[in-house]
Amino acid sequence: MNRLAVELQPLIALALGQGGVVFLRVAAVIAVLPAFGERTVPVRVKLMLALMFTAIVAPAVGPVTALDGPGKTVLVVVCETVIGLAIGLAIRLFVLALQTAGSIAAQSSSLAQLLGGAAAEPIPAMGYVLAVAGLALAVMSGLHVEVARLLIRSYDLFPAGRFPAAGPMADWGVVRVAQAFGLAFTLAVPFVIASVIYNLTLGVINRAMPQLMVAFVGAPVITFGGLFLLLVASPTLLAVWNNALFAFLANPGAGAP
């Protein structure tokens, strides 16, 4: 038994070392991952999620890098943490896009202040509703499965223990941010168009009947119209957002130089 334990000790140490390297990247992703990495999720739950994802990813990627000496260990810790945060933040941008779309829609429909402090971040009610609904839809659509696949594929895009080049990484991040803002405006377009039509109509009425207090007439109309448009358009908006999110998870290197 003692001989068997001695023979297995190097293998166990190697497996723990490789698992620890994978855990560094996985934990960094989980820390900012939508739904699983929210502020309301306890730290212990995040730790267990990171361990479970590590147990899934580590056997799939196999040996990732060798830890030869303290210098190599420190380099691997820094590289894997930075890469994990970059991947997690790229996914997090989709939630920020949904919140930005809600903010644009709320400003367009004069609903920016309603329940603005209900979330941990100061966002309008529309952004809060869209963000919660989007996260629920993503989780029900298999977000955890796609994230596990993304983590496995990430070792082809960002090899373990190798610090990504600053130029390509910056270009990749700029593309992600640009796509997030483009997606946010795309989702908010119906509300912007409705707001433009509303204000043009209100201006025409005001010129035709200056004595009419158009603000008292128009305020309830734009409020009801914004809520009605949210009710009607939100299923389509969330479907478009969910498709964009899963398209990125399936191909995280899209748009990269």
Image (cartoon, helix red, strand yellow):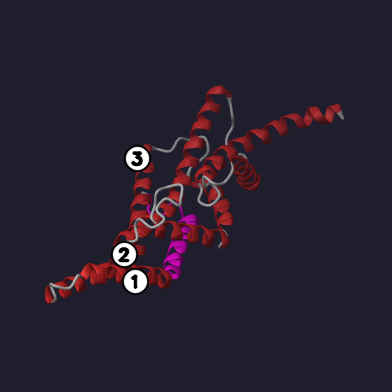
- Of tags 3 and 1, which is closer to the observer? 1
Quadrant where the image shows the N terminus: top right
Segment colored magenta: 234-256
Q: Position of residue 41 (x, y in %)?
A: 57, 46
Amino acid type, residue under disc 1 in the picture: Gly
What residue sits right under mark 1 in the picture?
225
What residue sits right under mark 3 in the picture?
167
Amino acid type, residue under disc 3 in the picture: Gly
* Element assignment for label 2: loop
Residues at marks 2 and 3, CA–CA distance in whole angstroms: 41 Å
Q: Main secondary structure of the magenta part?
A: helix
Asked if disc 1 and disc 2 are in contact, CB closer than 8 Å, the reply is yes
**Residue 109: mark in rendering:** 2
Above/below status of 154 relative to 224: above
Residues at marks 3 and 1, CA–CA distance in whole angstroms: 46 Å
Q: Is residue 197 left or right of residue 24?
A: left
Depth order, front residue of 81/72: 81
Q: Position of residue 43 (x, y in %)?
A: 59, 40
Amino acid type, residue under disc 2 in the picture: Ser
Depth order, front residue of 28/227: 227
